Image (cartoon, grey):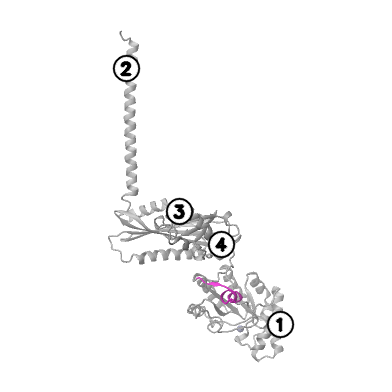
Amino acid sequence: MTQSASEKRKRAREIRQKKRRNLNRILTLIFVIALIIAAIAVAVNIWGNHTYKDEKEFEEYAAEYLSDNEQEQAVGQLNETIEYGQPLSVALTYPVTSQQTADDRIDAAVADIQNKFKRKNAGASKEEKKALILGYESHKTEREAVSVTLHKTEQEEKDKEMQTVNTAAYAYNFSTKTGRVLSAVQIFENDYKDFCSRYMTDYFEDKYKDELVQDKYKKALANSEENFNNFALSEDGVIFYFGEGTVVSAEEGSVAVEIPYKELGGVIRDEISERALDPNKPMVALTYDDGPFPQSSNRILDCLEQNGAVATFFELGQNAAAYPKVLQREKELGMEIGSHSWSHPNLNTLSDSAIKEQVDKTNNAIKSATGQTASVFRPPYGNSNASVVKHANIPVVLWSVDTLDWKSRNAASVEAVVKGVKKLDGKVILMHSIYDSTAEATENLVPWLLNQGYQLVTVSELLEYKYNETPKGKLYGYNYFYLND
Ligand code: ZN
């Protein structure tokens, strides 16, 4: 049988096609091998040799680490600080919001984390490599609050690789009204700890069965505020953070669990309560006598309003009658309005009927301005006797810290007196609302006290929360407002 010309051509075509198929196979194989090599190279770059030698490499390392851990960042502008060093290197990112009070708090927290890292590693030798890397997430919420959580990672070089040795999360919730940090009591109803304890115990026993720290986790999830005070409000719910090794084994790092808002019904307040107080945290009552005097009184009120704080104003009846608008503003802002007599006499020298007249006329003036009478009384010069207490018929409240603002007329002196008191918790501070120097001191003291962790309260709140006292018509004298000192 002979091959026809057409069969020859067909055969030649088949050979060419086969060669081409073989070439394609080889090319595919080469491509796959190349891919595998590339993948290995990438893997080695990520998992092996994952460290840095100089400033430029640390910057790259930190940037990559932070982008791997990129979180939701809904609030503020990103601020970045990178400090390469031997042995300690630091890469910090945190948000700058438009609210100074919140930014001051974030700055302080970042500085604190950085200082602790430096102190802890003060003895490291130059050959060691230790890094602090701080990322963050931030959220807008359906309430009048934003949250910022700082995520800390501490690393050390072991076997030419940076390895994580410690992680932590620090959550802050800021009021969008005042920029101040909100406490649990302002966000949750009172029984939230009980709810969280049951919810989290069920959650962890279900999801982390094998990783639970058996001798610790029940205590770490018990019904107590300190177990549930590291939380951030998010768009969808509340994220609770648990410290490394407290609930689940340390290899898991710090753990976050989000409870959706719909499951928190009845446990979380519908609106944030700026005025809710935590009796377990320190409190101070600022008091201002002798007003109202519009210029300085309004300046003090501006400061208190901006900071979401309150104070007590012991007003003179004759001034209240002259400037009722200041009293109306005090009432609107939730200040406590007290009586300081009509015309500032030494009441101990007056007859019963004269004392009664001083009390009644002042109450009438306060009532015609605000619709209510004074809730507390402070006699001029702190001078009172049984007749004064009887006619006042409301708590007669003196003070435990005298700023002598009337004498110094100097803001720095007033501030120094307050800052010089060892334990301010439970104290009543005496000032006068009629001096610009006192208004200036207030503008510095209020943010300072709040940053020190003091809740600023009225004297009635102080009596109720710190002294478990239902305020009544008796004298609360100079020796009353001392707590454990
Ligand atoms: Zn006075």
List the residue tagged with mark 1.
Answer: 360
- The residues colored magenta run 453-468
What's the CA distance linking mark 3 and mark 1? 69 Å
Q: Is mark 4 within 8 Å of ligand 1?
A: no
Examine the rendering and report whether any part of residue 75 can be seen: no
List the residue tagged with mark 3.
Answer: 209
Instruction: Please give the count of numbered marks on the rendered protein.
Output: 4
The disc at residue 12 is 2
Q: Can you give x and y, in whole percent of width and height, for residue 416 in the image?
A: 48, 79
Image point 65% across, 74% down: which residue? Answer: 326
**Closer to the N terminus: mark 3 or mark 1?**
3
The disc at residue 170 is none
**Closer to the N terminus: mark 3 or mark 4?**
4
Q: Amino acid at mark 3?
A: Lys
List the residue tagged with mark 4.
Answer: 192
Examine the rendering and report whether any part of residue 266 can be seen: yes
**Closer to the N terminus: mark 2 or mark 4?**
2
